[in-house]
Amino acid sequence: MRELLARAAALAADHRDGLAERPVAQAVDAAALRAGFGGALPKDPSPPSAVLEQLARAAEPGLTATAGPRFFGFVIGGSLPAATAAEMLAAGWDQNAFNAVLSPAAAAAEDVAGGWLKELLGIPASATTGFVTGGQAANTVGLAAARHHVLAAAGWDAERDGLFGAPRVRVVASAERHATIDRALRLLGFGTSVVEEVAAGPQGAIDVADLARVLAAGSGPAIVCLQAGNVNTGACDDLRAAREAAGDAWVHVDGAFGLWAGANPATAGLIDGVELADSWACDGHKWLNVPYDSGFAFCAHPDAHAAAFANRAAYLTGAGEVSGMGDLTPESSRRARGFAVWAALRELGRDGVAELVDRCCRLARRFAESLAEGGAVIGNDVVLNQVLVSFGDDAHTDAVIAAVQGDGTCWLGGTTWRGRRYLRISVSNWSTTEADVDRSAAAILRLAAQ
């Protein structure tokens, strides 16, 4: 085992060492890639060392350098050194992080790391923290807690009786909400037709006056979904004004990457009033740069959070003692995500997290300025780490996207914003430098000219 894990660590380190110079993405022969993994299931066992080497060889042609400094296609961070090492330790320790009985160490790491996260993001210390897989799970957990709370206030037990015959719950959300909100509503039995849509302003932030109008037009139990960090523009809703307009409604904030603005004094004003919400969703594998998969569901109402997810069974030792673990998340059997989160926060410290967020924002502005100087049109106010770039008509813009993806210097995706096609650039990797941005911008302009 010692030799095997040492070899795995060496292979992983070799991959990480080469990320800065390897093509971010390359043409892949899908059939050949599958053949490397394929063939008939072997009849006889294989030595673990041989399996590891075969896996490394088979995977290499299909690995995308998402952990490297020039991947800008999504808000994807590359895991920090300490977080990567902690994740390898967590795999070796093989802890089930359902509760403190199964792993006291995992429970302690999550408790401490959860406290640090709330302090950084401006979330009340009394809120509960569930360590989940990512933004989708975090939004689902937050809205499940909201479902319990608003229906319980109306005299209905959603966990016991479901939604058949329940009072209709109003879900009020921006036209610019993220798709994970809609999927959470499907998963929770609300359906997407329940959404009462609110207009968004020119940069994608919710129109607070229209929010007040929509809420005033109806009555009954209500959940208001707000956003910190528009997926295209980075714009943040006016959380304080929206909270006031929401009145007694439950307010949920989808802050997959935008909540990290609160960790940086220069951007914290974008999420002013964040502490007034009832639940929050945030990703760790985005701006905190921890390994996949890692997200956080925070809730200002611990009883509602636990009521929606607490697990009760006679054989589950420790079940019923609500902790920040299995009683606050959808999974019972789950890995100990808190170790890597703790390690990332310990490596960076408060100032390091602030510097990481601030630097990515500066690099995003540098990207926008360089591309604009080269003739591109920037489609958004660059307030965080998101940049929308157009090269005239949609067909030309899409051709540039395809050329960039095939070139390998950097990788980015496309999006449609307000009826136009754009390159969508997201800067969120701890290892990205000004040189990476300049090299990438030059490649984009070169390909656009061709």
Image (cartoon, rainbow, N blue to C red):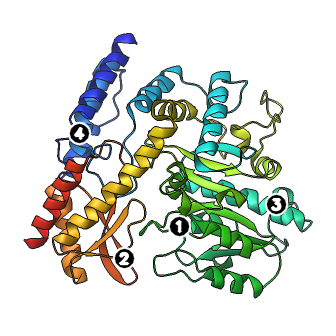
Q: Amino acid at mark 3?
A: His
The residue lying furthest to the left in this view is: 450
Q: Is residue 364 left or right of residue 341?
A: left
SS of the residue under disc 3: helix
Measure the C-alpha gap from mark 4 to mark 2: 30 Å
Measure the C-alpha gap from mark 4 to mark 3: 47 Å
Q: Amino acid at mark 2?
A: Thr
Mark 1 or mark 2, whichever is nearer to me: 1
Q: Amino acid at mark 4?
A: Leu
Mark 1, residue position: 236
Measure the C-alpha gap from mark 1 to mark 4: 32 Å
Mark 3, residue position: 149
Q: Is residue 349 left or right of residue 12?
A: right
Tell me the quarter of the image containing the C terminus.
Answer: bottom left
Q: Residue at x 16, y 53 (%)?
A: 439
Near mark 4 (Cα within 10 A), the count class, few <14, some 14-19 or many ≥20, is some
Q: Considering depth in this image, is 376 or 341 the residue closer to the camera? A: 376
